[in-house]
Amino acid sequence: MPNLEINCPIWWNALIQNIFRNILALDSLRQEEKEELIEYLVKFILLALKGMKKKLPFKEGIWEDIKVIFFSEFNKLKWTSLKNHFKNIITTDELEEKFIHELGRLDYNFKRIQYQSVLTRQSPLTIWNGLKKDYPTLYLLAKALLVLPMRPCQLKEYFQLLRQ
């Protein structure tokens, strides 16, 4: 199998690994069919990531800023930078005002939210779904950013499952 490197969100590791394990566990497929299915899945994932990269406002500087949606830190400048890069999400003056207000509340509640995210070990999307009511504008931005490729991960690791 080829050694393909893609950028993917942190939580994709577990998701993709689980999908590959489920494919490998299928008793109705021969080993060759399983390998072929996984090969097509890998091609699809790479194609989808390349398509996202073309359609979304991709810039290398964004990757450092995106860390704030994972509750690793609170940084008002990074949130504002993300908002400015994704003007297609915060589109009106009303949303801009809501963004500023929600950012202030997030700053106040950040340590508690960060602690809960570490304690529960939920995916960032699950955490943001829980925060949607209190932070609807930040949720929109975080949800959009969660689909962006985030950090290098090796698909080769998943191909190792084929050999086991």
Image (spheres, helix red, strand yellow):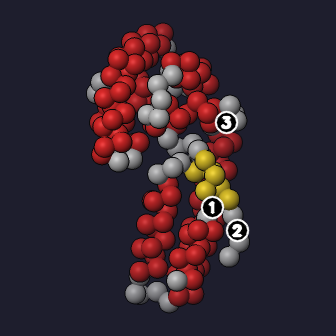
Q: Is residue 33 visible?
A: no
Label 1 – label 2 distance at C-alpha: 7 Å
Q: Residues within 10 Å of mark 2 (few under 14, many from 20)?
A: few
Tell me if residue 70 comes above or below residue 34 in the rendering.
above
Residue 154 shows which numbered tag?
Answer: 1
Residue placed under numbered mark 3 in the picture = 58
Q: Amino acid at mark 3?
A: Phe
**Do labels 1 and 2 touch, CB within 8 Å?**
yes
- Which image quarter is the N terminus in? bottom right
Q: Of marks 1 and 2, which one's residue comes earlier in the chain? A: 2
**Do labels 2 and 3 touch, CB within 8 Å?**
no
Q: Pick whichever, 39 or 61, lies toward us.
A: 61
Residue 43 pos. (x, y %)? 64, 65
Q: Tag 2's secondary structure?
A: loop
Tell me if residue 58 comes above or below residue 138 in the rendering.
below
Tell me if residue 149 comes above or below residue 35 in the rendering.
above
Q: Of marks 2 and 3, which one's residue comes earlier in the chain? A: 2
Residue placed under numbered mark 2 in the picture = 3
Q: Is residue 29 visible?
A: yes
Q: Residues within 10 Å of mark 1 (few under 14, many from 20)?
A: some
Q: Amino acid at mark 1?
A: Gln
Q: Amino acid at mark 2?
A: Asn
Residue 39 pos. (x, y %)? 61, 73
